[in-house]
Amino acid sequence: MARVSLQIKNVTSILLAAAASASSGITVKMYLDHKSWAFPAVCLAVALSCQLGLIFVESKEEEELSLTRKQRLEAVKAEIAEDRALTVRIQHEIEVGDPEAAARWIRFRKDKDGKHDLHRE
C-alpha cells in the first residue's frame, strides 16, 4: 500500500513538473508575442502551488514514519531491559542455590517469549 502511494505521488510530481514547465514556456512565448499570457501564468502558479503542497504532505508523512520508528525502537529497548532483568534474576537464583526458582523464571521467560512471538505475527 505504501509503495502504491509513493508511486502515485511520484507520478503526480512528474505531471506537475511537466505542467509547470509547459506553462512557463507558453507564458514566455505569449508574453513575447504580445498576447494575453494570464491563463498560462495562472496554470504555472497552480502547478507550482500543488507541487509545494505535495512536498509538504511528503514531509509530514516522513515525520510520522520517523515517530513510528522511534516508538518501535523504544519498545525493543524496553524488551531488552526486561530480558536483562530476568537474566539477572535467574543468575541470582542459581548463585543462591535455588534451581527450582531459576527453572520457574526460565519457564516464565519461555512462556512470555512464546506468547510475544505469536502476538507479533
Image (cartoon, helix red, strand yellow):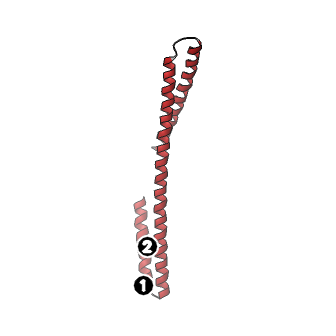
State which quarter of the image contains the N terminus: top left
Query: Could you give the CA–CA distance between mark 2 and mark 1, rounded to whole angstroms?
Result: 14 Å
Q: Nearer the viewer, residue 62 or 104?
A: 62
**Side of 91 relative to 25 (left or right):** left
Residue in view at x 48 percent, y 69 percent? 81
Mark number, residue 100? 1
Q: Residue at x 46, y 66 (%)?
A: 78
Local crowd size for mark 2, using a 10 Å CA cut-off: few (<14), some (14–19), many (≥20): some
Which numbered disc, 2 or 1, marks the residue that appears first in the sequence?
1
Task: Tell me, yes or no, if residue 97 can be seen here.
Answer: yes
Q: Secondary structure at mark 1?
A: helix
Secondary structure of the residue carrying tag 2 is helix
From this view, report whether residue 13 is shown above or below residue 62: above
Q: Give the residue at x 42% y 67%.
A: 114
Identity, as a three-letter code, of the amino acid under mark 2: Arg
Q: Which residue is mark 2?
A: 109
List x then y, in percent, for residue 109: 43, 73
